[in-house]
Amino acid sequence: MTDTAPAAEGRIHEFKTESGADTVKVGRKLAALLKPPQLLLLRGDLGTGKTTLVKGIAQALDAAEPDEVTSPTFTLIHEYDGTRDGDPIKLYHLDVYRLESERQLETLGLDELLTPNALVLVEWGEKFKSIKKRSTGEILITAEGGDTRKITVTLKD
């Protein structure tokens, strides 16, 4: 796992991983960078490790062990209760791949999730204008051959 120097005043962070275990470690590092309230697009092709990254974030927040974090493909949303510096934090992991319209999206109650202590990570959120508009950044995971991944985190000011 390599971590390249942050650019653009600390708002862009890049990591390279060589394994799923590395991706979990990067997730643990990212948890420290993400300050609630945040809604982040979690982008990457199928199988690039989006859920694996969330495993590390959840673990760092004492919200769940990695083996307890699964893809919300069919349930649409998973909610985890964690802490940071003794304060409660909510981690929401959404997968909106199966949704086709803004109307379907509205039934998830996204606005209700965005509380002051919430981190909301949305897989396939780029499909919807309303999510892109609300997002505070994105995490992009790209496969670079074999198990190597490039993880780019871009946080908006």
Image (cartoon, grey):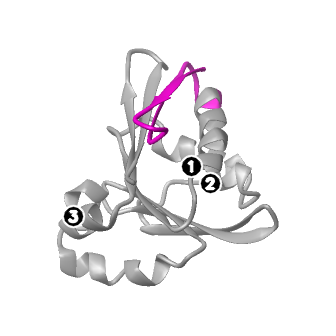
Picture mark count: 3
Marks 1/3 in contact by CB < 8 Å: the verdict is: no
Under circle 2, the secondary element is loop
Q: Is residue 43 left or right of residue 29?
A: left
- Compared across the picture, whether 133 is left or right of 149 comes to left
Q: Which residue is mark 1?
A: 54
Residue assigned mark 3 = 128
Magenta stretch bounds: 1-21
Report the front residue among 57 and 78.
Answer: 57
Q: Residue at x 60, y 73 (%)?
A: 117
Q: Earlier in the sequence, mark 1 or mark 3?
A: 1
Tell me how far mark 3 sits from mark 2, CA to CA. 24 Å
- Measured in 3D between alpha carbons, the distance from the residue under mark 1 to the one under mark 3, in whole angstroms, is 21 Å
Q: Which of the two labelled residues, at mark 3 and mark 2, occupies the earlier sequence position?
A: 2
Q: Is residue 85 left or right of residue 108?
A: right
Give yes or no for contact between labels 2 and 1 (Cβ–Cβ under 8 Å): yes
